Amino acid sequence: MALLLALADALGRTERVREALETFREAGAVALQVGSPVDLAQAALGVEEMELYTGSARGSVELLEAALRALSPSETVERCRVLSQLGRALLDTGEIERANELARAARDMARRLGDRRALLYALICEGAGALV
């Protein structure tokens, strides 16, 4: 699983985003099959990011929703990132109100966690929602 996620990440970093998208999708399917919430979250986050770069349809929403259900309800950086990127994906599907709710929840969680990177992602999502 780690190798598949690393391959997808490497493909994305070398601008082979369509291949990265497919590899992240494959990793998501495997993570669902083996019941690995953290790997599922990483795959879903990768799918969402690659969809953003490719302009692909937002199939990541279902994967991000699955990751959110699979992750522990406790406040973690992974959960925070899934919330913020789900919000960003929902903006593209027209679910503005829910996207804004998720962005605010992610922002507040990131602040409580004290994680600057998670806060950055949450604020980007929140800012994108304000522009719609």
Image: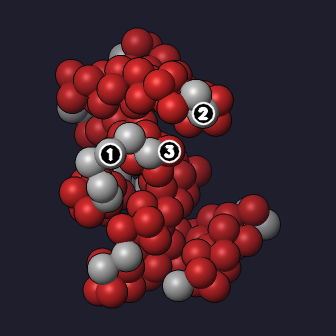
In the rendered image, the vertical position of residue 34 relative to residue 87, given as above or below: below
Quarter placement of the C terminus: top left
Q: Which mark is first along the chain, 2 or 1?
A: 1
Residue 115's label in the rendered image is 2
Instruction: Name the element at disc 2.
Output: loop
| Front residue (pair 112, 23) | 112
Looking at the image, tell me whether mark 3 or mark 2 is earlier in sequence order.
3
- Counting every numbered tag in the picture gives 3
Q: Is residue 64 left or right of residue 119?
A: left
Q: Is residue 47 visible?
A: no
Mark number, residue 77: 3
Considering depth in this image, is 78 or 46 the residue closer to the camera?
78
Which residue reaches farthest top?
130
Check disc 2 and give the amino acid type: Asp
Which residue is at 47% across, 25% downward? 112
- The numbered mark at residue 12 is none
Q: Nearer the viewer, residue 113 or 42?
A: 113
Estimate the x, y position of residue 81 in percent, counting from the top left: 47, 43
Spatial distance from mark 3 to mark 1, Cα to Cα?
Answer: 10 Å
